[in-house]
Image (spheres, rainbow, N blue to C red):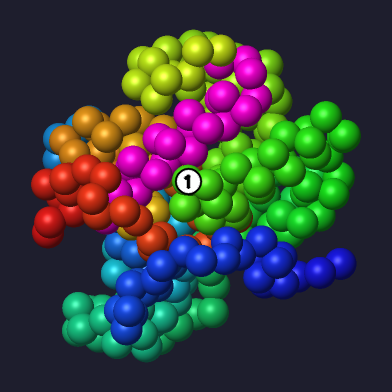
Amino acid sequence: MRSLRLLLLALSVVGLPAAADEPLADPRATLAKQLVALGTQYEHGEGMPQDPLRAAELYCDAARYGDAEGLFALAWMYGNGRGVEQDDRIAATLMARSAAAGFEPAQGAQRFFGPSAGVLPPCMMPRAPQGRNDPGASDEADLDAVLAALPPNKRRIAQLIRLLAPQYAIDARLALAVAAAESNFESLARSPRNAYGVMQLIPETAQRFKVRNVYDPAQNIKGGLAYLRWLLAYYRGDVLLTLAAYNAGEGAVDRYRGIPPYRETVDYVKRIYGMFRRANHPYDAQLVAPSPIAMR
């Protein structure tokens, strides 16, 4: 089986302009920063009900990406028994890892926790591999194997996405990941929230991008690609914000100045990042004025 890296190379969209000499942010670090920020909001009840359990989950997600601040925050949760069962061994291990990563607050606090006990929390233990035909598989997903395992009708939808994505200057890998997460390539899919078709367009979005028949695969895919192109321009190529807005709407992303603290949206962004694994994407700056949060 070819690796995901080879798949991504094979599906690369030719001719998309890249920002010259501009280093791309590490997708894992970018996502981890968002997760820690959301975890802090849940831990302290900032703008939402206080939820230590959800905070610990978010910190652990960030810690799995190797984020030193996430490790530090989760160490305190285990040390104080907030949202998780108190465990000094886990707390010491997490704090030692954060300190070793160069996080100064952890280096100062480590003397209170002692040396690493070599015990990780359950949420950081290796996970069992997911099925090959799971379109929402995690970081180890082999999207090529996913598409190969699709039945013929869904494989045709995937091939249509590959053909149409370059017309909208969208990396085919991103378009395929969104379609897999949204509908699993089902042209007749309908959500309880009245989102329709392959790209799960709500009526307002369909009208906005001139989709007359949401169940027509080509029209639906074109509408979804047009929306992705617009969002990428609005958020100046930030894939994480674009995905959050595709799920929750740009109004929610702008209001929260980042990924909204909705479990569905956070999980959605993580899921698609697990397949796409890039935090930046070329965009057309002439398409729309930037979001206020893209100017930060």
Instruction: Magenta stretch: give its range.
Output: 214-236
On whether residue 9 falls in the magenta region, the answer is no
Amino acid type, residue under disc 1 in the picture = Tyr
User: Taking 103 as reference, is 258 above or below it?
Assistant: above
Residue sitting at x 56%, y 25%? 220
User: Taking 274 as reference, is 161 above or below it?
Assistant: above
User: Taking 138 as reference, is 150 above or below it?
Assistant: above
Q: Judge from the rendering whether residue 85 lies leftward or rightward of residue 277; answer left or right.
A: left
Give the main secondary structure, helix, strand or loop, of the magenta stretch. Answer: helix
On whether residue 227 falls in the magenta region, the answer is yes
Question: x and y percent of residue 165 in the render?
Answer: 56, 46
Question: x and y percent of residue 281 in the render?
Answer: 41, 60
Splitting the image into 4 quarters, where does residue 198 fall? top right
Question: x and y percent of residue 46 in the render?
Answer: 14, 40
For the image, the number of numbered tags is: 1
- Of the 4 image quadrants, the one containing the C terminus is bottom left
Residue sitting at x 18%, y 48%? 290
Residue sitting at x 64%, y 41%? 161
Which residue lies under the disc numbered 1?
A: 168
The answer to whether one can see residue 75 in this image is no
Q: Judge from the rendering whether residue 120 lies leftward or rightward of residue 286; answer left or right.
A: right
The crowd level at tag 1 (other Cα within 10 Å; few <14, some 14-19, many 20+) is some
Between 258 and 81, the one nearer to me in the picture: 258
The answer to whether one can see residue 196 in this image is yes
Indicate the secondary structure of the residue bearing disc 1: helix
- Of the 4 image quadrants, the one containing the N terminus is bottom right
Q: Judge from the rendering whether residue 252 lies leftward or rightward of residue 219; answer left or right.
A: left
User: Taking 209 as reference, is 10 above or below it?
Assistant: below
Q: Judge from the rendering whether residue 32 lies leftward or rightward of residue 134; answer left or right.
A: left
Residue sitting at x 57%, y 32%? 221
Question: x and y percent of residue 254 in the render?
Answer: 19, 39
